[in-house]
Amino acid sequence: MFERLPSNWMLALKKVGYWIWLIPVAGIPMSFYWSLDSSHPNAWPWLVITVVFGVIPILDAIVGRDPANPDEAEQVPEMERQDYYQVLSLATVPLLLGMLVWSGWVFIHHEDWNWVGRLGWLLSVGTVMGAIGITVSHELIHKDPKIEQNAGGLLLAAVCYAGFKVEHVRGHHVHVSTPEDASSSRYGQSLYAFLPHAYKHNFLNAWQLEAERLKRKGLPALHWRNELIWWYAISAAFTAGFGLAFGWLGVLFFLGQSAMAFTLLEIVNYVEHYGLHRRKLENGRYERTSPEHSWNSNFLLTNLFLFHLQRHSDHHAYAKRRYQVLRHFEDSPQLPNGYAGMIVLALIPPLWRAVMDPRVRAYYAGEEHQLTESQQAA
């Protein structure tokens, strides 16, 4: 639909279009108010999760891909100097936290919903906190300014996944697409085999990385300068706050939406690197990370919702690049749909393998020996 538009027009369109993140956030209170006096009140809390994973994949295919890459010589420096894009991403923090607290109040006090409605509400809120909150936190923790680092950490603390702040930057980006990386799924590995391993090892890796950082400074792991202690303390404060304000059901809501949010993150990790790997060189090291080591998805609609997260190939090759100037590489491996559609596909392993395994084999055509047992799932 937009593939024939001039690049300058697309960049101008996207400058406004990034505010589309407000739609799923606003969808939470809208679904609540539409459930009032409805003949089917328990259906409305499922609205956001249904639209995200049922409607968006279809719209992705209709809207199509984004053809625009900013010019490196002129447009990229200019766009990176504009505070507008930083303010836009930081604006998500108070709105998401406000939405989260209000949603907890509704979960407890709205009596028209039975357990079906409450489950839909919890999953929908978790979807927004994962799709928007963790996506923005991912953007922010890669940047140097303290305000962005702290804002990213706060969003992760609000979904009990603070370890991502440490492990993703210092672990995943170092070991991506190698057997050492817990967030890089193997060829032939199902989502359900991947998730438990990812939960466990990303948590443990974060503590190990932070302990090693402190050790280099001559400090013990359990020291007040261990940032994980502070971020997890904030998560504990959130949990206690929901408990004091809303009782045990408030704790259930907070932990439930957190689980939904960080599970969504790990499913995206599964999608982003499935079957891809960096070759080990003769010196025993892995080749340098390049755009070929991440699946790219250039569908316009979900890229606007996700702050260009789907231009993941460029992000891994140049992790400090801000979201507004991430580029599409045509020669990087390409996903057949946006992340919303690919998440649905990943939930059904036979369909996932039917779609993705041929793409992995085609990508390594002529050197199938690269798909050795060390890259495949056990």
Image (cartoon, grey):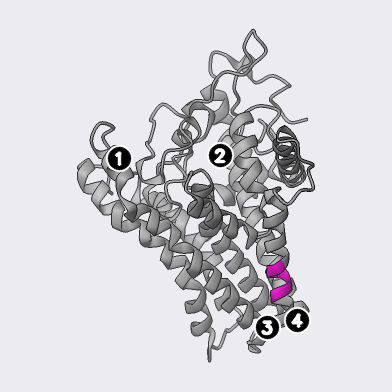
Find residue 150 and report its image quarter. bottom right
Query: What type of secondary structure mainly makes up the magenta span?
Result: helix
Say whether residue 367 is left or right of residue 90. Answer: right
The magenta-colored residue range is: 237-241
How far apart are the two marked residues, 1 and 3, measured between alpha carbons?
Answer: 46 Å
Say whether residue 204 is left or right of residue 60. Answer: right
Amino acid type indicated by mark 3: Ile
Amino acid type indicated by mark 4: Gly
How far apart are the two marked residues, 3 and 2, measured between alpha carbons?
Answer: 36 Å
Residue bearing the label numbered 2 = 272
User: Is disc 4 placed on a helix, strand or loop?
Assistant: loop
Mark closest to the chain's N terminus, 3 or 2? 3
Residue at the location (53% across, 81% down)?
32
Residue bearing the label numbered 4 = 247
Whether tag 4 and tag 3 are in contact, CB under 8 A, the answer is yes
Mark 1 vs mark 3: in front = 3
Whether tag 3 and tag 2 are in contact, CB under 8 A, the answer is no
Find residue 167 and report its image quarter. top right
User: Is disc 1 placed on a helix, strand or loop?
Assistant: loop
Mark closest to the chain's N terminus, 1 or 2? 1
- Across and down, in percent, residue 299 comes to 40, 46
Crowd around label 3: few <14 · some 14–19 · many ≥20 (10 Å): some
- Across and down, in percent, residue 372 comes to 69, 19
How far apart are the two marked residues, 1 and 2, measured between alpha carbons?
Answer: 20 Å
How far apart are the two marked residues, 1 and 4, measured between alpha carbons?
Answer: 50 Å
